[in-house]
């Protein structure tokens, strides 16, 4: 038996195969949730990305927010501090959900956790006013991304929004990309990143919403970070008239 197979336990095969050491192994979960570690992985940009993301959180009263998969660091506690609304959070890995619960016990009544695969959500249609995706898509193979786009389109109601923090387009001119060894290392640790770099997220999302009978505006606001290495995008769903 290959080592990763010990971590399958209901999670997507690609997650166990390529990321068991980062998201499923208990010592990996312990290690990577240190703020200094996750900040180093994002080349010192975590706080800046967090601040830009929180600035676009839906705060209207009674809005329902879905954070799609758990995130290392202080995103979830900060999100709950930024809004008095309910926040739903799902992840395929029980270890990640346990970690998030420990960090959100003080607001457990507003933080609803569920074990779900982002490709097949158990929520009803039009359940949420906003879906937040923080550095998830680049860790998915293409088919998984397509399935997740479709599920996002299904659960976001007209008048809602989608907020995405991710790598930007292929950063040909960035110094990190131009150093061959660093580019190779990043590609080795993130085997689906190259394919994600080539993908037009806006076009994929617009098409996914169209298939659900909804209209997604072109990206409402996009902010770049770290010399266009990362980006934060917000897409608004046209409200029914």
Image (cartoon, grey):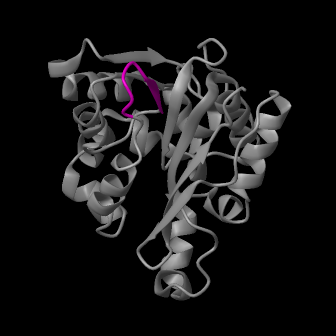
Instruction: Return the residue nearer the eye: 39 or 179.
Output: 39
Residue furthest left as drawn: 106
Instruction: Return the residue nearer the eye: 121 or 210.
Output: 210
Note whether residue 1 is visible.
no
Look at 22% across and 34% down and name the residue there. Answer: 81
Residue 80, image quadrant: top left
Look at 52% across and 20% down and name the residue there. Answer: 9
Note whether residue 197 is visible.
yes
Judge left or right: residue 197 versus residue 74.
Answer: right
Q: Is residue 72 part of the magenta span, yes or no?
A: no
Q: In the figure, 55 relative to 12: above or below? A: below
Q: Position of residue 110 (x, y in %)?
A: 29, 17
Instruction: Return the residue nearer the eye: 58 or 204.
Output: 58
Look at 37% across and 15% down and name the residue there. Answer: 112
Q: Quadrant of the N terminus?
A: top right
Look at 30% across and 22% down and name the residue there. Answer: 98
Query: The magenta stretch spans which residues?
Result: 59-67
Q: Is residue 65 part of the magenta span, yes or no?
A: yes
């Amino acid at each position: 038996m290959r080592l990763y197979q010990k971590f399958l336990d209901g999670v997507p095969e690609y997650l166990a195969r390529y990321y068991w050491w980062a998201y499923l192994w208990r010592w990996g979960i312990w290690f990577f949730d240190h703020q200094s570690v996750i900040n180093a992985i994002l080349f010192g940009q975590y706080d800046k990305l967090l601040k830009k993301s929180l600035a676009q959180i839906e705060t209207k009263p009674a809005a329902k927010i879905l954070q799609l998969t758990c995130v290392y660091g202080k995103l979830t506690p900060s999100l709950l501090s930024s809004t008095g609304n309910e926040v739903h959070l799902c992840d395929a890995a029980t270890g990640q959900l346990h970690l998030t619960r420990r960090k959100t016990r003080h607001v457990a009544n507003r933080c609803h956790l569920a074990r779900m695969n982002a490709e097949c959500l158990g929520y009803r249609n039009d359940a949420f006013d906003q879906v937040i995706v923080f550095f998830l898509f680049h860790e998915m193979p293409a088919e998984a991304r397509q399935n997740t786009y479709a599920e996002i389109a299904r659960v976001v109601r007209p008048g809602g929004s989608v907020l995405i923090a991710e790598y930007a387009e292929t950063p040909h001119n960035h110094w990190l990309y131009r150093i061959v060894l660093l580019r190779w290392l990043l590609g080795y640790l993130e085997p689906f990143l190259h394919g994600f770099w080539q993908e037009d997220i806006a076009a994929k999302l617009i098409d996914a919403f169209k298939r659900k009978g909804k209209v997604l505006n072109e990206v409402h606001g996009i902010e770049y970070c770290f010399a266009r290495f990362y980006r934060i995008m917000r897409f608004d769903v046209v409200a029914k008239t």
